[in-house]
Every structure is written in structure tokens, then in C-alpha cells.
Image (tube, rainbow, N blue to C red):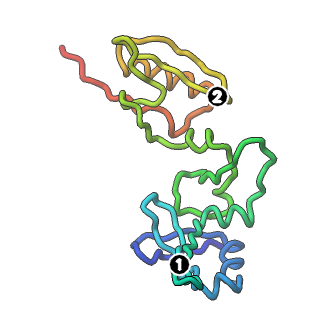
Amino acid sequence: MIYKLKLKNSDKSVLLSAEAYDYIANHLYLRELNFLQNLRLHSNGYAFFQKNHPTKDGGYRNETIYLHRFIAEKFVEKPESDSRLFVKIKNGNPLDCRLSNLEWVPFSRVIRGTSKTRSKTGYRGVHKEHNRYRAVLYDHGTRYDLGYFDSAEEAAEAYNKKSEELFGKTRSLNKIKRVPSEK
């Protein structure tokens, strides 16, 4: 069974597996906090709970719980790894917190599943160097120099080809802007 819970500050809903829902609904501390009724949408798209607890010195202690991470820590097996692991949402929807949609991965795999880039060229793995465009890709510390190209689009195509060869089709592939050719 899948539970669909409306978020407090949004019209959107979060999806939970029955096992995770039952655990949270029956957890004494989380029940006292009205955890399930106070889930909100974070600006980064994830469901989270936040509460400020008063302290003895008159200040406050903030408690923030990201739902996908909380569920993964309780239910998803964390593999042995030398690198720090993060929770990846397999289908890319941060509001789909079903157990089957969560996995622990190194940061490089999290990034591989995103389409955002901060490159000045607008393409992942492409930068301008000496009036040409260079395509570079990394995999587990290995650098792949893919060459220099006359246009950012050509370099992005080379990046996409190598990325697909190494990782398959991922959301990190560049969306190449085609300029209509003049006739």
C-alpha cells in the first residue's frame, strides 16, 4: 500500500510506503511532534519537518528532519563504502519517498542524476579554453579529456557520447541547443 500525504505549506503531496508510514505513525516521539501532519515542502523540493525547541537558557534548538533521509536511514540498507554516502531518489521526484525509490550512493552518483550545471558555457563538462571549447568527463577519479572543439555544442555532444558509454542514459546528459542552419 502507498500513502499520499498532503504537505502543510503546499498543494503537493508526498508518497510513502506502508512500512515507513506505519513506523512513523507509531513512533512515540514523532507522534508527539505531529510529524506526519507537519511535513512541509522545502525550497529544494524535498519534504521535511522542522521544529524549534526552547532551551533552558532562553534560546532555541532547531530540529530539521528530511523525510527521504529519515526513511533511508531506518529502512534502506547502507552499503560499505570508503566515501560518504547520500540518499538518491531513483526516479528524480523528491516527493516520492517510497522505499523502492531510495538508495544510498556516493555524491558522484547523486550529481550524475541531476540536469543542473553551473558551467558558463551552459553545458556540463564543457569549458572555454583559448577560444575553443574543451570537453572533460570524470569517473571515479579518472579524467577523460575528450578534446577541443570549435563550438560548445560540439563539445557537449562529445561529453554526452562518452557519458552515455560510461553511465548509460542519465539526466546529466546535456540538452544541446540547436541553432537552425541558414538555407
Q: Residues within 10 Å of mark 1 (few under 14, many from 20)?
A: few
Q: Secondary structure at mark 1?
A: strand
77 with respect to 148 (left or right): right
Q: Nearer the viewer, residue 15 or 9?
A: 9
User: According to the image, label 2 marks what residue?
Assistant: 139
Vertical placement of 157 versus 174: above or below? above
Whether residue 131 is situated above or below residue 138 in the rendered picture: above
Residue beneath the point at 72% across and 63% down: 73
User: How many residues crowd around disc 2 within 10 Å: few (fewer than 14), some, or many (20 or more)?
Assistant: few
Q: Residue 50 location, x and y as percent?
A: 53, 74
Q: Is residue 120 left or right of residue 80?
A: left
Looking at the rendering, which quadrant does residue 78 occupy? bottom right
Residue 89, how many percent across, how many down? 59, 54
What's the residue at 52%, 63% (across, down)? 95
Q: Quadrant of residue 110?
A: top right
What residue is drawn where x is 68% and y is 46%?
Answer: 105
* Residue 145, position as x, y percentages in the image: 55, 15
**For residue 4, which quarter of the picture?**
bottom right
- Residue that label 1 marks: 60
Q: What's the residue at 47%, 74% (across, down)?
A: 7
